[in-house]
Amino acid sequence: MATNRTFTMIKPDAVQDNHIGGILSMIEAGGFRIVALKKVQLTPERAGQFYEVHKERPFYQDLVKYMSSGPIVAAILEKDNAVADFRTLIGATNPANAEEGTIRKKYAKSIEANAVHGSDSDENAQIEGDFYFPANEQF
Ligand code: CMP
């Protein structure tokens, strides 16, 4: 059953290029509510943990290096049918295949530096959100 939350990261290239505001605007205009938000820089160890499902893929080492190369913005988003609708809003992983009007069409530079991450399932949305926003976090 579709839940109403997904998780996203604005990746280092888009943060570096000053696109945090532009991307968050597209997210809000797309009908999503930002329920949690933070800007952090991952260590290579933490980036490796986040992308552990891709450990055996040939691009894993480069992905870990890239994702720890500068700050990212992590967010939990809310909307009916959030996971599927957000994947539609961001467009294809490879920006060469991303449709007009999507976040990746506008901001992505390459399959690696593709501006944003979006969870691929309700289960992963929960796991990825918890990774950045643990329930016991204190301020
Ligand atoms: P993301 O949705 O964050 O999930 C895994 C990431 O690996 C993906 O976006 C891409 O940025 C990155 N990646 C790098 N190379 C590839 C590739 N050849 N195929 C799929 N993903 C890739």
Image (tube, rainbow, N blue to C red):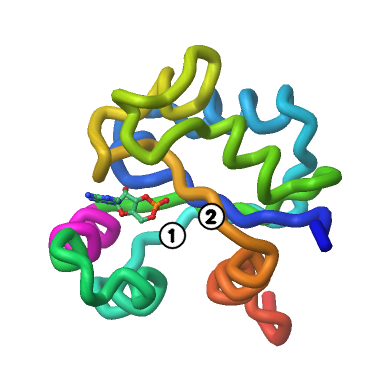
Towards the viewer: 109 or 111: 111
Q: Quadrant of the N terminus?
A: bottom right
What amino acid is at disc 1?
Val
Q: Residue at x 75, y 56 (%)?
A: 5
Q: Residue at x 31, y 69 (%)?
A: 54
Q: Is residue 5 depicted above or below 26 in this figure?
A: below
Task: Give how far apart the Cα atoms at labels 2 and 1 are.
Answer: 8 Å
Q: Say which residue label 1 marks.
A: 40
Q: Is residue 7 visible?
A: yes
Q: Secondary structure at mark 1?
A: strand
Tag shown at residue 80: none
Q: Secondary structure at mark 2?
A: strand
- The image quarter containing residue 42 is bottom left
Q: Position of residue 119 (x, y in %)?
A: 56, 56
Question: Residue 68 lies in magenta, yes or no?
Answer: yes
Q: Position of residue 86 (x, y in %)?
A: 64, 40
Chief secondary structure of the magenta portion: helix
What amino acid is at disc 2?
Ala
Question: Residue 21 lies in magenta, yes or no?
Answer: no
Crowd tier of the residue under label 2, counting other residues whose Cα lies within 10 Å: few below 14, some 14–19, many 20 or above: many
Residue range of the region highlighted in magenta in the rendering = 62-69
Q: Position of residue 59 (x, y in %)?
A: 17, 59
Crowd tier of the residue under label 1, counting other residues whose Cα lies within 10 Å: few below 14, some 14–19, many 20 or above: few
Answer whether labels 2 and 1 touch (C-beta < 8 Å). Answer: yes
Q: Position of residue 75 (x, y in %)?
A: 61, 53
- The image quarter containing residue 134 is bottom right
